[in-house]
Image: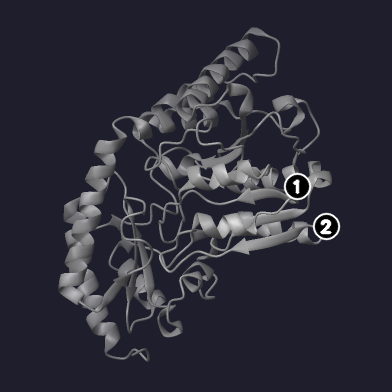
Amino acid sequence: MKVYLDNAATTKVDDKVVAKMQSYYLEKYGNPSSLHAKGEEAFQELHQAKSQVAKLLNTDTINLIFTGSASEANNFIIKGVARANKDKGKHIIISNIEHPCVLGPAKELTMEGFEVEYIPVNKKGLIQPSELKKRLRKDTLLVSIMTANNEIGTIQDIKKLAKLTKANGSIFHTDAVQSVPDVKLDIKNDNIDFLTLSAHKFHGPKGVGLACINPNIKIRPLISGSEQNKGLRAGTIDVPGIVGFAEALKIAYQGRQTKINQIKKLRNYFYNQLEKELGDISLNGDKDKRLANNLNVCFKGVEGEAILVDLSQKGICVSTGSACSAHNLKVSYVLQALRIKSKYLNSNIRFSLSKYTTKKELDYTIKEIKKTIKRLKNFSPIK
């Protein structure tokens, strides 16, 4: 049996999304910047897709800048906002469990004279509003805190954190890539200035990210050279990708609570069975304030990499953490932030389900994990 439990890394594209995109490759393939009929057709389709996304996120179409990835969007926002507004302050706050594509540009900005402060999470992976409040300063320019973590699935109280930031006169950004459909994003009501999404995390196409921006806040382009997107992001606009993004987001939010409940039920069943069969395991991250599809489990006494390889040979795809660092055997900084005992930092597996996951697949996985753990514990150096 083939079982895919790495949906936090990427998801299968929904058949309806593929069908929606097809005609934009074969028939409606005009460049929306062109003035002829084919270009005008593409422009109208682009406007319709953007309007759909804007409505779902409660923002305006003028605020949507589609990018080639969430990594690009995060770099664009973090660097662009900091460089364009450095006269207002050079203090930046980010959490210590942000995705590398937020940590990277923040670190780069320190070489330009910015001061980056890392706000810690508690042992459950959550940021306490009081921790943010005491770190906010008059010269705090930007606060960037992810909505939901890609490794441990914890969901932050973004509305409260954004409110504190705005009350301080600072700019608020959230990397919301992992949050769809669990969090019903509401940019206007949640005081969010800048937000990042990526289509392939919710059954849309790869290569399409989104930067939602506040048009009243200055931002410098990351990619310049032409006038697309009002000069904020040069390059031929990817109409098929944006149409796919819009369709995937629409589907993700249709009957979202029912979908969330179904996935959560399967997730809880899976974890309860693992606990029953194996006993010596623990859950990383908050039990309740987490994504419905996420389980980050510590298998005490066994190397996570060994579990991953063994399960892969049995047709089961899982992860030891972030897909962006899958070939890097360093200890996860996210798990370190939870203050997990050092001897268990390499004993973790992330299981991430999707709407396509079945109970039959989970039962097969449980059966095979039981065999894997029993075999690996016989010669594991971890006790």
Q: In the image, what residue type sits under mark 2?
A: Glu
Residue occupying image coordinates x 22% and y 57%? 268
Mark 1 touches mark 2? (CB < 8 Å):
yes
Which comes before the other along the chain, label 1 or label 2? 1
As drawn, the label of residue 349 is none
Q: In the shown orientation, is residue 254 left or right of residue 99?
A: left
User: Is residue 105 shown to the viewer in this render?
Assistant: no
- Relative to the observer, which residue lies in front, 309 or 201? 201
User: Residue 161 appears at what percent x and percent y?
Assistant: 53, 48
User: Residue 127 appears at what percent x and percent y?
Assistant: 49, 58
- Give the residue at mark 1: 82
Residue occupying image coordinates x 70% and y 15%? 34
Q: In the image, what residue type sits under mark 1?
A: Ala
Q: Is mark 1 on a helix, strand or loop?
A: helix
Residue 304 quadrant:
bottom left
- Give the residue at mark 2: 112
